[in-house]
Amino acid sequence: MPHFETPSETVFTVGAPSLKFGLGAIAEIGEDLHELGVSNVLVITDASVAEHGVPARVATSAQSVGVKAEIFDGVAVEPTDASIADAVKFARARSCDGFVAVGGGSAIDTAKAVNLLTTNTGTLHDYIVTPLGEGRQPQKPTKPLVAVPTTAGTGAEATPICVVDLLDRSLKASISHRSLRPALAVVDPLTTVTMPPAVTAASG
């Protein structure tokens, strides 16, 4: 009879954000933001997703319940330290108290980093995990972040991790902390309808 050794650590925790799923779910994002206490939201996306109108629909939903909304569409595909710095600068100038990320993993990861760096002191490098960064832990709570995935490839809407390209070192690095996990994931299958077929085929 074969003998199997079991690992000494057999207990684990699964953490996940609240999940709203359904056709047309993004029409309710304004109410979701209101319930989260958000009054001034920044919608973070990339130019390609913005062209197809989903971020504008999110902003309209927010505005319909009195939540001020603005769109940042400068997310880089495969976010870099430089592109995140641009997004952080944009967000700081608007004093927003909540975020909605619309897009694939790049938009959601960018929003996670922006949320962290607009609520805590320090630089991106400070929070990147060792040995590439300092591995600092956030000291202050982040703001409400709602993730609206338009692809099914990364699962970034459910994780506490963001990945960034360090341009000067030609390396990928990550930040990992439970406070990065979105407060709510809104999964609306209709958002994939407006995506280019090649994107949907490649990423789900």
Image (cartoon, grey):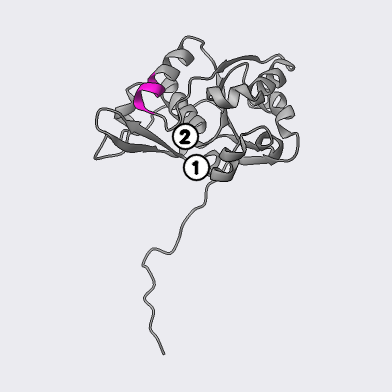
The C terminus: image quadrant: top right
Amino acid found under the numbered disc labelled 2: Leu
Residue 142, compared with residue 201, is above or below; it is above
Q: Which residue is mark 2?
A: 180
- Toward the viewer: 102 or 4? 102
Mark 1 or mark 2, which is nearer the start of the sequence?
Answer: 1
Cα distance between the residues tagged 2 and 1: 8 Å
Which residues are the magenta region? 80-85
Judge whether residue 204 can be spotted in this image: no
Residue at image position (37%, 28%) is 80
Say which mark, if any, is on residue 60.
none
Q: Are marks 2 and 1 in contact (CB under 8 Å)?
A: yes
**Frontmost residue, 168 versus 14:** 168
Left or right: 84 in relation to 27: left
- Picture coordinates of residue 113 (x, y %)? 43, 28
Q: Secondary structure of the magenta portion, mostly? A: helix
Residue 184 included in the magenta stretch of the image: no
Disc 1 packing (10 Å; few <14; some 14–19; many ≥20): many
**SS state under label 2:** helix
The N terminus sits in image quarter: bottom left
Instruction: Name the image quarter holding residue 162.
Output: top left
